[in-house]
Image (spheres, rainbow, N blue to C red):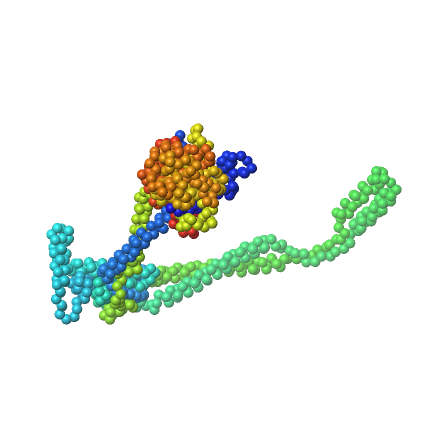
């Protein structure tokens, strides 16, 4: 008997808030109230298949994966396949590590310090009018790398080690060479024969051993420098550590020799020695020429002669400026004296005698009397009175006359003016000075002209002497430069003789006995990854090409039929856990509601008949039929009759331990009545019809209409008639019987039921008037871990 369980998270129906109490005991027929209550419950199982509708299992493209969890479950479904492929990958990696040829490496490190090669140029390059350039450290490193990577270095290393040793990958052993064994001779014969065949076919060129060895050295050497560093790393790989060390050692020595040769110009010392002697002779000739020129001119130096002339010219200029200023001053004095002399009087007043004037006194007395009379009249009369006006007119006239008169009288005595005589004397003296200054200025100008002539002669001599001095300085500079370059050439020649360079080998070629290839961790990881990805690819391919139905999405996408319930697999069906029992009860309640909400045949009896049919044996159809009948009778309080229509398996009869009363076989054959076939279940308020009595070994051979007709009488007294039909894969009349029932539930076993078998069953059912309620996906399994399932659920 198949076992099953459900999971509300995978079921397409929500929990019923009524807790199974769907009928109202205080009202009418329980079926109607159950239908009314169930109609109010939410349904997410999609539309039911009816005869009027087109088939829902039309091919929709065969989609295998339609959700993220479907993809994530693939590694967990086929974990053993992936594990096997991973183990094979690890084993293959182990064999590869054993069989892979070993490669050894040697390394040397060179330090390129700041030396003469990087702080100066070759003496022959800086002799002319060129700039003193300084190479940067990066240029020095790049140049050294180019030298080390040149073919010349590879050829020299090949000549030193030997082409045969390089091609063999090992240094020749000391003493006489050993004769190769039989295996060695066979291997050599095979290689020679293969080489001749490829050479004859034109696939290989005829290359000498020396050229092959040079190519081998060039490909085995790896020379590089870390970023922002003055260290050069020389690495080589070979079949033996000794050969790798020898290649690196010879490459390093060859580079040092070439570096010394490239930093020196041949013949530079002799060249600069000869040029220095020529420059010294030219300088001595110029010095003698300058001495003869100074003797001919009778001068000590141009500077002293120039200073003497400059001093004389300065004195003359100073005297000329002073005389000119004095002349201007004297001329101005003469002009001023003449003006003053012309404006000075010939005679001046010698003495003055002052006295009082009687006319002014009388006039002043008269004015005083008029003022007193005016005040008296002004006190007695108005301003317009004739007397007052007359007195005021007289007072005004008297004041005017008094103002014109002087109060005192002065008597003067005159004599000749002595100032005019003094001005005349000073004027004569200044005129005489003007004449003297003019004469001195003329003499100074003559002297100035003579000194300028001497200055012009001195400048001409100075020009000639300056030219000679310039030639002497140029000769001295040239001689100094040649002497410096001669010293540099001598130092470079001496450094080359002593093999002194700015390149230091601070790490000679190393002898590393540990092979660098194959890299065992990387190789193992690569084969491990290859095995895992191969197993994962096979898992995806296997899952994609699988014709079985595993998830609700597979059923709906490939069959086009709705999944009304998804029941997970559990290990204990007879005594399930409380949580599993509750979920199973809720799923069965939902299925009962789907059955009652379906369409009833026109003119049919009161109750409804539903067939539970599995696509394959062991799909759990019998177990679902028993649980569905129990939920209908117990939770929904429906009058339920469960018929065991599987006469081969008889799972329902064994599960409920029915007695030896007749069953469906006897009922259809007419050997037993309807009441004789009914049996009551223990502990469950429902009735059962077994497949056949214990003593009956006959099978159900009647046709489908007769079988269904025999069960029609029970529909008058029950609300729901559940028929446990044999699997569709059995040669019984399960499909034919299902075509004559009101509705059918198709049971599909997850991961075992083939889509072609389920499709054939649904197409057969579509040919009748039977309503296909949907598909129940039984024994589903969730391969995702709980934490991953929660993550996927949260994303959804």
Is residue 30 among what the camera can see? yes
Image quarter (top left, top right, bottom left or bottom right) of the C terminus = top left
Q: Position of residue 774 (x, y in %)?
A: 40, 38
Depicted 56 relative to depicted 517: above or below: above
Q: Is residue 285 visible?
A: no
When the figure is inspected, residue 626 is found, relative to residue 409, above or below; the finding is above
Q: Residue furthest top?
A: 603
Q: Whole-percent x and y of residue 644?
A: 39, 40
Number of callouts? 0
Along the line of sight, which residue is nearer the eye, 732 or 4? 732
Q: Nearer the viewer, residue 770 or 697?
A: 697
Residue 363 as seen in the image, left or right of residue 153: right
Instruction: Tell me where residue 356 appears, x and y as whole percent.
Output: 78, 54
Question: Of residues 686 and 165, which is closer to you in this image?
Answer: 686
* Residue located 50% across and 60% down the image: 326
Residue at x 64%, y 55% (from the top left corner)? 347
Closer-to-camera residue (458/279): 279
Q: Tell me the residue at 28%/63% (across/down).
A: 233
Q: Position of residue 790 (x, y in %)?
A: 44, 49
| Quarter occupied by residue 764 | top left
Residue drawn at x 56%, y 55% as measured from the top left: 336
């Amino acid at each position: 008997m198949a076992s099953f369980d459900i999971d509300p998270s995978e079921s397409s129906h929500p929990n019923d808030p009524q807790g199974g109490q769907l009928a109202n005991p205080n009202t009418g027929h329980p079926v109607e109230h159950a239908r009314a209550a169930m109609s109010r419950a939410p349904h997410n199982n999609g539309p039911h298949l009816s005869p009027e509708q087109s088939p829902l299992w039309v091919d929709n493209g065969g989609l295998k994966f339609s959700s993220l969890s479907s993809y994530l479950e693939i590694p967990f479904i086929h974990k053993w396949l992936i594990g096997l492929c991973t183990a094979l990958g690890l084993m293959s990696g182990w064999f590869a590590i054993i069989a892979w040829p070993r490669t050894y490496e040697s390394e040397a490190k060179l330090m390129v310090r700041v030396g003469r090669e990087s702080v100066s140029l070759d003496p022959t390059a800086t002799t002319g009018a060129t700039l003193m350039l300084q190479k940067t450290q990066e240029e020095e490193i790049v140049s050294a790398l180019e030298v080390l990577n040149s073919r010349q270095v590879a050829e020299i290393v090949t000549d030193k080690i030997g082409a045969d040793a390089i091609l063999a990958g090992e240094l020749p052993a000391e003493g006489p060479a050993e004769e190769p064994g039989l295996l060695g001779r066979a291997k050599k014969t095979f290689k020679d024969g293969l080489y001749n065949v490829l050479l004859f076919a034109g696939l290989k060129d005829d290359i000498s051993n020396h050229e092959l060895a040079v190519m081998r050295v060039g490909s085995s050497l790896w020379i590089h420098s870390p970023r922002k560093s003055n260290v050069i790393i020389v690495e080589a790989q070979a079949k033996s550590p000794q050969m790798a060390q020898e290649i690196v050692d010879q490459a390093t020595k060859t580079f040092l020799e070439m570096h010394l040769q490239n930093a020196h110009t041949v013949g530079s010392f002799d060249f600069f020695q000869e040029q220095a002697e020529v420059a010294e002779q030219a300088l001595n000739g110029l010095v003698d020429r300058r001495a003869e020129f100074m003797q001919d001119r009778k001068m000590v130096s141009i500077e002293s002669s120039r200073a003497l002339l400059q001093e004389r010219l300065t004195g003359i200029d100073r005297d000329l400026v002073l005389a000119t200023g004095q002349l201007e001053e004297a001329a101005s004095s003469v002009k001023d004296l003449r003006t003053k002399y012309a404006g000075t009087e010939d005679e001046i007043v010698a003495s003055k005698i002052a006295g009082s004037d009687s006319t002014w006194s009388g006039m002043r007395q008269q004015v005083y009397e008029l003022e007193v009379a005016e005040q008296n009249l002004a006190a007695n009369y108005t301003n317009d009175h004739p007397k007052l006006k007359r007195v005021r007119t007289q007072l005004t006239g008297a004041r005017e006359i008094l103002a014109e008169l002087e109060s005192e009288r002065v008597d003067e005595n005159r004599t000749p003016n002595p100032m005019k005589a003094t001005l005349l004397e000073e004027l004569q003296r200044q005129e005489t000075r003007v004449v003297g200054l003019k004469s001195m200025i003329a003499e100074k100008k003559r002297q100035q002209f003579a000194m300028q002539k001497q200055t012009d002669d001195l400048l001409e001599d100075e020009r000639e002497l300056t030219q000679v001095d310039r030639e002497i300085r140029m000769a001295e500079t040239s001689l100094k430069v040649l002497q410096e370059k001669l010293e540099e050439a001598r130092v470079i020649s001496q450094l080359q003789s002593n093999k002194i360079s700015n390149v230091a080998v601070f790490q000679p070629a190393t002898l590393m006995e540990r092979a660098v290839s194959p890299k065992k961790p990387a190789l193992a990881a690569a084969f491990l990854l290859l095995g895992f990805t191969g197993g994962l690819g096979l898992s995806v391919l296997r899952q994609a090409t699988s014709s079985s139905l595993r998830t609700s999405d597979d059923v709906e996408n490939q069959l086009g039929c709705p999944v009304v319930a998804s029941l997970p697999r559990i290990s204990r069906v007879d005594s399930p856990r409380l949580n599993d029992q509750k979920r199973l009860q809720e799923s069965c309640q939902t299925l009962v509601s789907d059955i009652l909400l379906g369409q009833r045949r026109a003119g049919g009896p009161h109750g409804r008949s539903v067939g539970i049919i599995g696509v394959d044996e062991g799909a759990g159809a019998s177990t679902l039929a028993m649980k569905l009948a129990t939920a209908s009778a117990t939770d929904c309080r429906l009058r339920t009759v469960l018929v065991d229509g599987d006469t081969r398996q008889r799972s329902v009869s064994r599960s409920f331990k029915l007695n030896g009363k007749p069953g469906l076989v006897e009922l259809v054959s007419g050997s037993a009545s309807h009441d004789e076939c009914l049996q009551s279940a223990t502990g469950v308020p429902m009735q059962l019809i077994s497949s056949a009595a214990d003593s009956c070994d006959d099978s159900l051979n009647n046709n489908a209409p007769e079988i269904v007709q025999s069960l029609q009488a029970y529909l008058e007294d029950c609300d729901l008639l559940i028929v446990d039909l044999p699997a569709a894969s059995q040669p019984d009349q399960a499909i034919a019987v299902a075509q004559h029932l009101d509705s059918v539930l198709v049971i599909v076993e997850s991961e075992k039921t083939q889509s072609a078998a389920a499709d054939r069953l649904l197409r057969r059912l579509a040919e009748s008037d039977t309503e296909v309620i949907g598909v129940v996906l039984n024994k589903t399994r969730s391969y995702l871990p709980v934490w991953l399932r929660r993550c996927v659920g949260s994303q959804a």
